[in-house]
Amino acid sequence: MLPLIAIPVGLVGLLTGISLATGRRGLTMLPQSPIKGVVLVRWLRFTRTMARRPRDYESPRGRLGAFDMDARRLSDVGFAENPRKVIVGSETGVWTADWKKPISKDVFLGSLPVQYEAFKRSMVQMTPAVVGFVGTEVDGCRCSLSGLLGVGHMAGVAGVASWVKNPDTRKKFNNTTETFQLTNGIF
């Protein structure tokens, strides 16, 4: 769990150093959130919340790394190609794909910065597809962008609409609903 703590501590150190040496352009040199309009501190909180696994995590269903990404999403963001479902042991419908060089499964699982880049690309790519649901009421809560991105991360972009509109879907996929509850309202 120590590597997950090291990221925020390292980022705080980086931000402190940058703020003390801003240069000619002043605050424009500060790191920015990858999603326009989202304050960096909130983006970092969202990122920490979504990094729920160890760096080298591999689930029986093929989800990988700290951000629990599947091969389908890794293909969507350019880290792999040829996504397809296979049977792995007793698990059916497990996403797999062919890694794009120089990335490999070992490289991905061994590098938190590579995993963060995949996660960041995924969230940026997903934002236009889910932003239309911001403000929708679901089970007494107004959906925020961060909550919907959490849902999309678990259910895929296509699964967001079904999750928002259908209470049975929210019950059936309780991990997705739990992720929504953890991330909703961050931004």
Image (cartoon, helix red, strand yellow):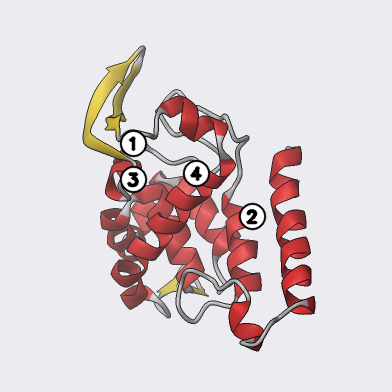
Mark 2: few, some, or many residues within 10 Å (few <14, many ≥20)? some
Residue 62, numbered label: none
Mark 1, Cα crowd under 10 Å, few <14 / some 14-19 / many 20+, is many
Circle 2 or circle 4, nearest the eye: 4
Which label's residue is closer to the chain start, 1 or 2?
2
Residue 182 placed where, x, y %?
59, 58
Q: What residue type is disc 1 on?
A: Ala
Marks 1 and 3 sit apart, C-alpha to C-alpha, by: 5 Å
Q: CA distance from mark 1 to mark 2?
A: 21 Å
Quarter of the image for the C terminus: give it.
bottom right
Residue picked out by circle 4: 114
Q: Quadrant of residue 90?
A: top left
Choose the circle earlier in sequence order: 3 or 4: 3
Q: Is residue 181 above or below residue 78?
A: below
Mark 1 and mark 2 in contact? Answer it, CB < 8 Å.
no
The amino acid type of the residue labelled 2 equals: Arg
Residue at 54% in and 52% down: 178
3 or 4: mark nearer the eye? 4
Give the structural element (helix, strand or loop) at label 3: helix
Q: Are marks 1 and 3 in contact (CB under 8 Å)?
A: yes
**Which numbered disc covers residue 73?**
3
- Whole-percent x, y for residue 100 in the image: 30, 35
The residue pinned by badge 1 equals 71
Q: Where the N terminus falls, by quadrant?
A: top right
Q: Residue 10 appears at what percent x and percent y? A: 74, 55
Q: Residue at x 78, y 62 (%)?
A: 13
Q: Name the residue that disc number 2 marks.
A: 48
| Residue 40 position (above or below residue 88) | below
